[in-house]
Image: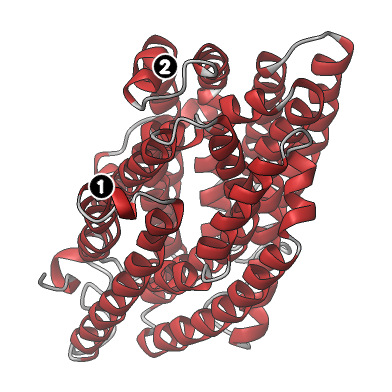
Amino acid sequence: MLKRSDINMTEGPLLKNVILYTLPIIFTGILQLLFNAADLVVVGRFRGSVCVAAVGSTGALINLIINMFIGLSVGAGVTVAQAKGAGDGKEMHKAVHTAILTALIGGVILTGIGIAFAGNLLEMMDTPDDVLPLSTKYMRIYFAGMLSSMVYNYGAAILRALGDTRGPLMFLTIAGIINVVLNLLFVLAMGMDVDGVAWATVISQTIAALLVLMSLSRRDDSAKFKIHKLRIYKGSLVKILKIGLPAGFQSVMFNISNVFIQTSVNSFNSVAISSGNSAAANIEGFVYVSMNAFHQTALNFAGQNMGAGNKKRVKKIMLCCLCCVGIFGLLLGVLGYVFGRPLLSIYIVDSEEAIGYGMIRLAFICLPYFLCGLMDVATGAIRGMGSSFTPMVITVVGVCVMRIVWILTVFSIPEFHTLEILYMSYIISWTISFAAQMIAFSILYKRLENVSGTDDNIGNESNAEVPT
């Protein structure tokens, strides 16, 4: 039974439902990114580019630490989506409560790691000495709110798997407004710097997490959240781990490569380069979350249709999402570059040199960003079909390993030690990985076509995995 806010993924006009489902995810992602954007804008305009560099330099490291647990939320979403498509209310109940408890445990672990090792890890990344103390302070406070961040991300993944994308959008809108207000209050009225924007993010994330839990607790189906039912159900945990661990490991490796990129940026030992890179990366983030929304759409649409046995619809979902993400990505990438200088000026008001370095990044990463979107949609569709190991291997080798090898070889040559050569690694890795993902999807789809009937463990990783 569908709630009024749930999108029907298994029936009805595909393009219309894909767009209706995806648009709220795009707006939600933009709002979530605005948490960090508000941090950068406020400290940049009122505390200078050093604070911009301090906040921005923590991004890759924070993502590296948290993404294994965020990857498990992908497993939770696919498990819930397949149970929803199959009409298995008992499995939905188990998956929801296992996922939320996993989020709580993960949040506690990450809080301890982030607070204890922030300074050491930032030093290992060669964070410039003039921004290290501020970066450490920001990162430690940020991790104080990790429990809320985990609960929100897992809860939102569950709601999306059920077909509800408007709920997370509404919750994050409320939290986003509170975040901006608190940024201004803490920095302007109370004279704080990076600690002020960090606490604003923690508080707003906590509000978003509470709202997600309230939404789940008010559902009238088997996905209804009941705090006294929290427990780890072994079968559900196994399914979540089967999909989530490869997704999490992929994210970890992806961010290891980004840490190498950030360390390579730091190797120039220039605050102007660091702040320009951070500001441009934040602008690109708005393009990325818009494209990544189609990844989530492909993931959940494929998951529900595999659960329902609609194998032929999965191929249509893949093609529809690829067309949409290609158009959106190309349009937004061009707009991001064309309006790059005035956009960078929002973040950086005291360094024209930093803006120039930001424009270099936008030219090499933002313009061709649609390639990343194509790669992510292919990954999402394969994972929604129940196969998580193969896209992990492709991404780890095609993106992570390739970038690290590029940095250690080509970029290390003195005459090639430039930002342009460093950023070229993105274009090459996206192209290679997308081609490989499409080959993997074709093989997996043909194997599923050869399965007799529609009840033969469709979506079961052990039966559907593509040899690598």
Which one is nearer the viewer's eye here, 454 or 106? Answer: 106
Q: Position of residue 427 (x, y in %)?
A: 40, 67
Relative to 114, say whether 322 is above or below: below
Relative to 427, say whether 288 is above or below: above
- Answer few, some or many: residues within 10 Å of disc 2's Cα (few below 14, many 20 plus, some between 14 and 19): many
The answer to whether one can see residue 98 in this image is no
Relative to 310, say whether 116 is above or below: above
First in sequence: mark 2 or mark 1? Answer: 2
The span from disc 2 to disc 1 (Cα, nearest Å) is: 27 Å
- Answer few, some or many: residues within 10 Å of disc 1's Cα (few below 14, many 20 plus, some between 14 and 19): some
Q: Residue at x 78, y 29 (%)?
A: 42
What residue type is disc 1 on? Answer: Ser
Q: Residue at x 54, y 55 (%)?
A: 361
Horizontal side, residue 150 vs residue 267: left or right: right
Which of the numbered marks, if any, corresponds to residue 118? Answer: 2
Horizontal side, residue 85 vs residue 453: left or right: right
Q: Secondary structure at mark 2?
A: helix
Q: Residue at x 21, y 65 (%)?
A: 390
Task: Please identify the quarter of the rendering in which residue 216 is found.
Answer: top right
Q: Secondary structure at mark 1?
A: loop
Proximity of marks 2 and 1: CB atoms separated by less than 8 Å: no
Furthest toward the left, the residue is 467
Where, quadrant-wise, is the N terminus in this rendering? Answer: bottom right
Which of the numbered marks, if any, corresponds to residue 412? Answer: 1
Horizontal side, residue 97 vs residue 429: left or right: right
Relative to 91, say whether 432 is above or below: below
